[in-house]
Amino acid sequence: MEIDNIQKVQESKVKNNQQFIQEINRIFELQKGTHLQLAQTTYQERRAKLMRLQVAILETFKEEINEAAYKDFRKHPMEVQVSEIFPIISAIKYTSKHLRRWMRDQVVPTPISSFGFSSRIKYEPKGVVLIISPWNFAFNLSFLPLVSAIAAGNAVVLKPSENTPHSSKLIRKIVSSLFDESEVAVIEGGVPETTHLLTKAFNHIFFTGAPSIGKIVMKAAAKNLTSVSLELGGKSPSIVDQSADVEAAATRIAWSKSLNNGQVCIAPDYIYVHHSIKDKFIAAYKERINKMYGDNPQASDSYNRIVNRRHFERLKNYLEDARERGAQIDLGGVTNDEDNYISPTVVTELDESALLWQEEIFGPILPIRTFSKINEPIEYINSGEKPLALYIYSRNKKNIQNVENNTRAGGMVINYSATHYANPNLPFGGS
Ligand code: NAD
């Protein structure tokens, strides 16, 4: 009986595997057959597609988006509005405004040696592109690259994350209500599905996720000489020097570390604070957290959960590791296995080899270290991977310039955190 059951499970797995492999092969071939027609669509046609997407996000599916995000990890509707819907609409508006110009051929001078010729640059879509998105802003990070890909006239296969199943299912529903699958198709699934997708010779892959998975994607893409855009994560530092407005710094860092429960690629990962203001900063941070979530953040309806058990255990393990190394918990440190809850937490006196210093935290735990001279954080930052974002809180121009000139980061914000993401006129990215 036991063996029969095992056999049945294996047979059904093989059948499922064959199903998704066939489905991916079918869609890929279908899109290969249509991308040249899509490339010839006009500005008006592409804009009309973006407008349809806008109506779907803002009106038709608005409530369903809120529900899915809440079911996945208790994301509050206000946060959904600010961090999922607003960026998509803003990208649609920005793209629609500039698209006509972006699509136009560019006439360039011809050297005298080629007298009699004229020269122009014609902008072409890539062809069939694959978008692989993460779970932390499931809608935003699926639809934002989709907006660019559609505007450029590509056919798209979109693979949202398996970690937010409600959102991914809804993304599929939204896309299939708007597009024929020969143009845009959603493949749901995890590693097996993505692994098969990566065997296909896409013309471009846009991947957002962890650096370790980015390496897998890049390696697979190299086999087909497929170009890649990698939007990865890492440890984004914040420096708070002795001249800073401590209250403002604590307020802004508390906000950006709490958004999505710290599960944000540009969240402040750790703080480097001047030793003379450390206690004042921690007191202000605690007060701010209390103002946002009260004495018991677990009871607050605007405090998200960690997305799943695996990430919850990962963060709990970082905390246990910190405790074992004799670190001081200045705020929180409370966890609850039943609902993947981790309270807003501040850790100080942390041993250099602690996991919290080694790994991207991606959660509401904030380690704090101190410095005496500004070159200390500069050297520390330069000794690690180039961060995706770097924040400095200071009123000292020399310190700001020193940090700006002597470090490298994907983006830098002075006296705020994470706000550069909201400006479509700024580039966003890492290395
Ligand atoms: P992840 O890398 O685990 O997953 C991202 C996607 O890759 C998912 O769709 C997943 O199904 C797929 N994937 C996972 N393992 C795979 C494998 N072995 N082979 C092929 N595909 C695989 O990332 P995540 O946990 O969803 O998101 C968190 C990470 O993403 C963090 O590191 C964060 O900093 C980063 N991130 C970066 C940005 C940015 O804009 N730079 C934005 C959001 C998140």
Image: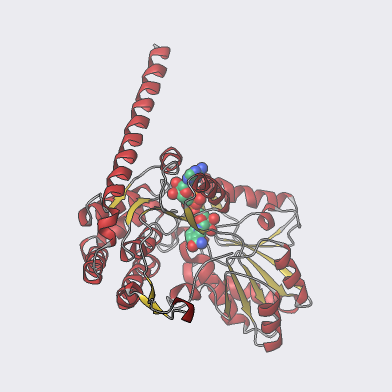
**Residue lying at 25% horizontally and 55% vertically, measured from the top left:** 174
- Count how many numbered circles sit on residues in the image: 0
Q: Is residue 237 above or below residue 177?
A: below
Residue at position x 55%, y 60% in the image: 364
Image vertical order of residue 330 relative to residue 418, above or below: above
Q: Position of residue 202 (x, y in %)?
A: 40, 49
Outermost residue to the right: 372
Q: Quadrant of the C terminus?
A: bottom right
Residue 126, quarter of the rendered image: bottom left
Front-most of 419 and 132? Answer: 132
Asked if residue 380 shows in the view, the reply is: yes
In the rendering, at what x and y percent does residue 106 appear? 38, 77
Give the residue displayed 70% in from the left and 67% down from the top: 381
Viewer-side residue, 12 vs 301: 12
Please give left or right for residue 62 compared with residue 413 in the image. left
Q: Is residue 340 visible?
A: no
For the residue pair 332 and 396, the one nearer the viewer reads as: 396
Q: Quadrant of the N terminus?
A: top left
- What colouring method underlies this structural image? secondary structure
User: In the rendered image of this protein, does residue 95 appear above or below residue 124?
Assistant: below
- Outermost residue on the top side: it is 1
**Percent position (x, y) of residue 102?**
35, 74
In the rendered view, does 322 fall on the left or right side of 33?
Answer: right
Q: Position of residue 145 (x, y in %)?
A: 39, 62
Report which quarter residue 241 is drawn in: bottom right
Q: Is residue 49 left or right of residue 351?
A: left
